[in-house]
Image (tube, rainbow, N blue to C red):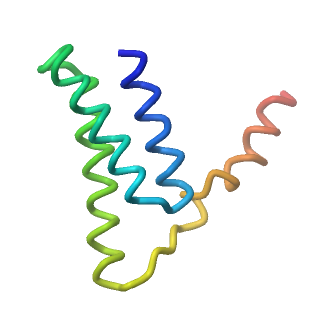
Amino acid sequence: MTVASSLINLGEIAFARGDLAAAQDYQSRALGIQEKAAPDSLEVSYSLTALGKVLWHRTIFARRGTITLAPWQSVNAWRPIRWNLLRL
């Protein structure tokens, strides 16, 4: 399951960067691994949710013709929060 977890993380990073095709690929590969290892697990449901999020955004962006992520979806948006938490 570590490979699947890594693929999920890579998919989240690709999503945050706006590369929805790569995000879909990573999430789909993770889902395939998890379905073989533990078909009815929570990990499978998490992968389905993550993949659904990517597909939903691809549909929305296809209709609009643009790919723009909200500021809270950017990887850089969390850096100040992380820095403040590390300083506590």
- Residue at figure coordinates x 13%, y 20% from the top left: 39
Residue 47 lies in quadrant: top left
- Residue at figure coordinates x 42%, y 25% from the top left: 5
- Residue at figure coordinates x 74%, y 46% from the top left: 79
The x, y position of residue 42, in whole percent, is 24, 23
Position of residue 71 in the picture relative to residue 11 (left or right): right
For this orientation, the residue located farthest to the bottom is 64
Where 52 falls versus 30 (above or below)?
Answer: below
| Nearest the eye: 53 or 27 | 27
Where 12 falls versus 42 (above or below)?
Answer: below
Residue 7 lies in quadrant: top left
For this orientation, the residue located farthest to the left is 40
Q: How many labels were placed on the picture?
A: 0
| Nearest the eye: 52 or 2 | 2
Residue 37 lies in quadrant: top left
Q: Name the quarter where the N terminus is drawn.
A: top left
- Residue at figure coordinates x 44%, y 81% from the top left: 66
The x, y position of residue 88, in whole percent, is 84, 27
| Nearest the eye: 59 or 21 | 21
The x, y position of residue 3, in whole percent, is 41, 21
Where 48 falls versus 80 (above or below)?
Answer: above
Where 70 falls versus 63 (above or below)?
Answer: above
The x, y position of residue 58, in whole percent, is 32, 67
Position of residue 35 in the picture relative to residue 50 (left or right): left
For this orientation, the residue located farthest to the right is 87
